[in-house]
Image (spheres, rainbow, N blue to C red):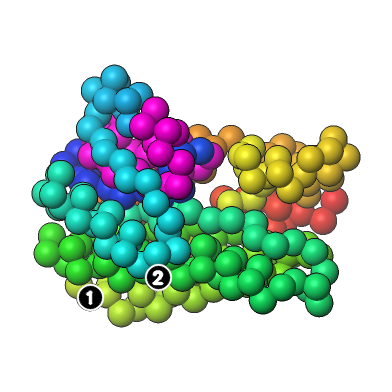
Amino acid sequence: MQRLTGKVAIVTGASAGIGRASAKLFAQEGAKVVVAARRAAELETLVAQIVSEGGEAAYLAGDVQAEDFAKALVDLAVSRFGRLDIAYNNAGTLGEMGPSTGISADGWNAALATNLTSAFFGAKHQIPEMLKQGGGSIIFTSTFVGYSFAFPGTAAYAASKAGLIGLTQALAAEYGVQGIRVNAVLPGAVDTEMYRGMNDSQESQAFVTGLHALKRIAKPEELARSVLYLASDDSSFVTGTASLVDGGASITRT
């Protein structure tokens, strides 16, 4: 049985990685999907693939830092598919890396705008539409970095992603009585463009792999299955959580 039959979902950061894998899985599980990212060509290819497999999807390219874009995504979901039930606010960036005393104001603000403020804008416009359906599920992509431990040189990334956990809890407490669940998924290392950009040598990749109890990094499809759980009614009594999907990185000291 498909777990998202009759549901409509928004997925941001869907041009690659976890977002792309989640959008495809949502569609396979019966959802009609609106996908978003900056790269239109990749979104067009993704929508074509979903449609070729019998699903329904639409895309809108734009910048998640803009509140107007968050509203436009909700408007597209409603105009095209009639409702909104699920939102996976996944878009993110590593931002400016390096010693914290050297991070520029622009670099700091850009990381917060992409990783945290965009998620707030998304939820701000998604929640009113979900309330019309009697509830829904909102999911954010945070990270184990800045939650269970952190790396030097990641202040903007860690702070912005940690902020998502506070946002998750505040929204879950505020809207739970109205049937809206809000959760954050906290991946460990995942084989994505972002991961490879941060770890561009065999030595770095070996080090990061060793941090995990499973002694490997995740595939995007593995994270997508955890996101599906939070999106579906399988998690009907789960809200306000920071859900670690980190391959045991948080508990490993060997």
Q: Amino acid type of disc 1? A: Val
Please give the residue where the numbered disc 1 appears in the rendered image: 177
Q: Which residue was labeled with disc 2?
A: 120
The magenta region covers 17-45
Q: Depth-wise, is mark 2 or mark 1 nearer the camera?
A: 2
Q: Considering only order in the chain, which callout, 1 or 2, is on the residue closer to the N terminus? A: 2
Task: Assign the magenta stretch its main secondary structure.
Answer: helix
x 26%, y 36%: residue:
57
Image location of residue 94, percent across then percent down: 64, 57
Q: Amino acid at mark 2?
A: Phe
Q: Secondary structure at mark 2?
A: helix
Q: Are marks 2 and 1 in contact (CB under 8 Å)?
A: no
The vertical placement of 70 against 34, above or below, is below
What percent of the width, then of the height, locates residue 158?
A: 65, 67
Residue 30 lies left or right of residue 62; in this view the side is left
Q: Nearer the viewer, residue 196 or 225?
A: 196
Q: Is residue 190 above or below residue 174?
A: above
Is residue 181 visible to the viewer in this orientation of the structure? no
Indicate whether residue 142 is drawn in magenta.
no
Q: Is 26 within the magenta?
A: yes
Query: At x 44% / y 74%, what residue is drawn?
Result: 167
The extreme right residue here reads 203
Q: Residue at x 79, y 40 (%)?
A: 200
Label 1: element kind? helix
- How many angstroms separate mark 2 from mark 1 (CA)? 19 Å
